[in-house]
Image: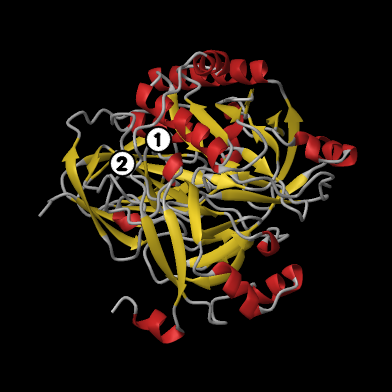
Amino acid sequence: MSSNYLDIIRPGINTTFQDKGRDHLYHIGIPFSGAMDNRNYLIANKLVNNNLDSAVIEFAYQGPHIKYSGEKINCAVTGDVIFSIKKKDTEIEGKCYESYQIENGDEINIISTNKSVYGYLALGGEFDLKYQWNSCSINTKANIGSNDGKKLDVGQRINLKKINSNKDIKKTNYINTKIENIRVIKGTNFDYFSEEGKKIFYEKEFTVSKLSDRMGMRLEGPKIDNIVNTNIKSEGLIKGVIQVPADGNPIIMLSDHGTIGGYPKIGVVASVDYDRLAQMSPGSKIKFKEINLSDAETLFKLYEMETQNLLSQI
Amino acid sequence: MIKNISNLGDAALYCDFGNEVNKSINSQVIKYFKTIKEKKFEGINNLTPSYNKLIISYDLKKTNFKEVKNYVENINAEDPIDINSKKLEIPVCCHENFSMDIKRLEEILKLSREKILENFLNKEYFCYMTGFIAGMPFLGDLDENMRAQRLETPRVKVPKGSVALTEQFANIYTFESPGGWNILGNTPLDVFDSSKEDKPNLINPGDTVIFKEITLDQYKNYNE
């Protein structure tokens, strides 16, 4: 029996363990998974003195309410999240990007994400989790990963294997920026669409639909007309591919996406904008802007440098 | 051979082996897939072979399009070692509880339900690839008169075990998932098992599959 553990009082809407994911199994149909917003995942770990590839709790919209039992441990929340920490006689409003020390009997209540989708809760230590293909990331569709591949449920107890001896309190002033345009690279079937359709894709606004989850983001808006074929021979997909099925409404592949698809690809979201794309909640307006490969590579390099900078300052 | 290499986004190579779908082109794809997987080029991670394409993903923090393209253009793809292909029989129940798109298929194919089942069952299909969802096999080829397009709007939820058709291919939904194929029946068999990390897929590329019809009673009692 572990003496340090969490009890789930309320699981939240879609609460899972995530880490860096699995990057070598597309050929048998297993997607990346992993934290949807990679930058916030890394920062969460850094704030509690974890290895950067440690498991964290990812939540969407409403998060979990947990009770901690055991010796003192640090915790931190990242994203744009409203949460509170309840100690013996006080309840304090939590601030993202700051670590807190909690002790036996304390509770963390993650009320909701604010105008965004995902948030992260890291604990300074190591959860006792099952790893499949070197990752604990939960893929609820294929029931792969820790917790039998299922999202966290009420009444569950989660044990910690280890608690970090480094209990330094950390803080950073990171602010999640919103971007007006999602930058995309032309897809391999761009020419399947009418001139009007191509114009709509780059010039009109789309709305993120409620039918969006870790697998994909469905968009609503003006229809994109296909003039060649609404089907292609099924072939590989990657994160960020934008497919347009016959109904003309784009679908963007996210981290738990199907590895193969047969709808034409109008574009692919540039890696630099993936984290921010994943955070766009239903009802958000989205506009696409075309960039070329070399700009996409440069922008990603800068984004990655910025991430490393942020981490090194924590 | 690879006819053309382009980029799919900023973190993947899109290798096109030609427009046709046949075993010979597919075996070229598999050859490149196995060779590249074996060689472990720094930065290359996921590889997705399909009928006539190979998508090579890479970590943009470690390499880039130019480097990976140059590498792929200069490798010497070797013939794969024997892939140890199997012949498998898959039970399928085509009761109306399961064949959600039979009406649509009857209309598109202009064939009766009986004729559709007769054309589909008891024939050998070749597994070209696996994926979309974990372990889903893509099997071909269906007879010419059995080819229908995908649904116009994919379903948000296709039941686990669904056996479905699109164009010259059949597949099996190993999990409940979104999907746009025409559903003909359902198998009670587990086609994917994540507890077997080294061999999670029942059906692998190169295998041969035959669908055998079972009744609703047999279906219900199958896993008892």
- Across and down, in percent, residue A177 comes to 60, 31
Element assignment for label 1: loop
Q: Chain of mark 2?
A: A
Question: Residue at 55% of width from left, 21% of height from top?
Answer: A303
Label 2 crowd bin: few (<14), some (14–19), many (20+), radius 10 Å:
some
In the image, A223: left or right of B202?
right
Q: Chain of mark 1?
A: A
- Across and down, in percent, residue A127 comes to 24, 45
Element assignment for label 2: loop
In the image, A7: left or right of B115?
left
Residue type indicated by callout 1: His
Dot 1 and dot 2 residues touching (CB under 8 Å): yes
- Location of the C terminus of chain A by quadrant is top left
**Relative to A156, does residue A80 appear above or below in the rendering?**
above
Question: Residue at 40% of width from left, 19% of height from top?
Answer: B41
- Across and down, in percent, residue A39 comes to 47, 31
Q: CA distance from mark 1 to mark 2?
A: 9 Å
- Across and down, in percent, residue A211 comes to 62, 58
Q: Residue furthest left?
A: A1
Q: Which mark is residue A133?
A: 2
**Relative to B128, does residue A312 appear above or below in the rendering?**
above
Question: Residue at 83% of width from left, 37% of height from top?
Answer: A198
Residue type indicated by callout 2: Trp
Q: Is residue A66 visible?
A: no
Residue under numbered circle 1: A24
- Location of the N terminus of chain A by quadrant is bottom left
Q: Residue furthest right?
A: A196
Q: Quadrant of residue B46?
A: top left
Question: Residue at 65% of width from left, 52% of height from top?
Answer: A282
